[in-house]
Amino acid sequence: KSTSGTVDGEIRNLLWRTVPFILQNTDLFISKNMTLNTTMSIVGTCTLRGEGIELLLGSSGQLDVTSCSTLVLQDLRIADLEQNKIRCVTYDGTIWFRNCDLMLSSAYSFTMGSLVVDEDVAVRCGQSFVYTTSQVSYIYPKARLLFDYGTTFSYGADTDTRLAMSAS
């Protein structure tokens, strides 16, 4: 079952609560800055889109991508990103950043699954982005993975071929 729409009403109320919930095959447009204070599990292919709005990951806010699932984060400013608040819970999940600013509040670890960088993705705020997944990840043509001055990119994958440039 697929769903699409603007985040308001029931979905907005869920985002403010602390009860975990599941998004399945959903395309959501987030129309206003908001705070996620719960765990949102992603099943299937889900897209969270904004037009430069801020998605703040509160103290309990987390996005968990489940097995064989993909989360596309598009045109968002993601604030208070740390530890692995946005993560794949299995090796076969994918997190796709498209035109996002990642505002790190402390070290962020990408430990499992695949990462896709599409368009401009900026890592900001002078913290560490720790990449240790064993799965292949991609930076697409004409895409840029940018790091603010003072930000550390730590690459700890088990082989040098795990971060690839795509020709398509």
Image (cartoon, rainbow, N blue to C red):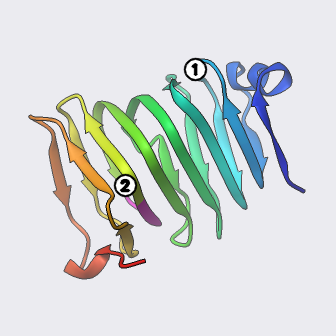
For label 1, the residue is 35
Quarter occupied by residue 32: top right
Q: Say whether residue 104 is magenta.
A: no
Q: Quadrant of the N terminus?
A: bottom right
Q: Say whether residue 115 is magenta.
A: yes
Q: At x 42% / y 62%, what residue is drawn?
A: 115
Of 94 and 119, nearer the camera is 119
Amino acid tagged 2: Phe
Q: Disc 2 or disc 1, which is closer to the eye?
A: 1
- Marks 2/1: CA distance? 21 Å
Give the secondary structure at mark 2: strand
Residue 69 in the image, given as x and y percentages of width and height: 65, 64
For label 2, the residue is 110
Amino acid tagged 1: Thr
Q: Is residue 65 above or below residue 91?
A: above
Q: Which residues are magenta?
A: 111-116
**28 relative to 111 in the view: left or right:** right
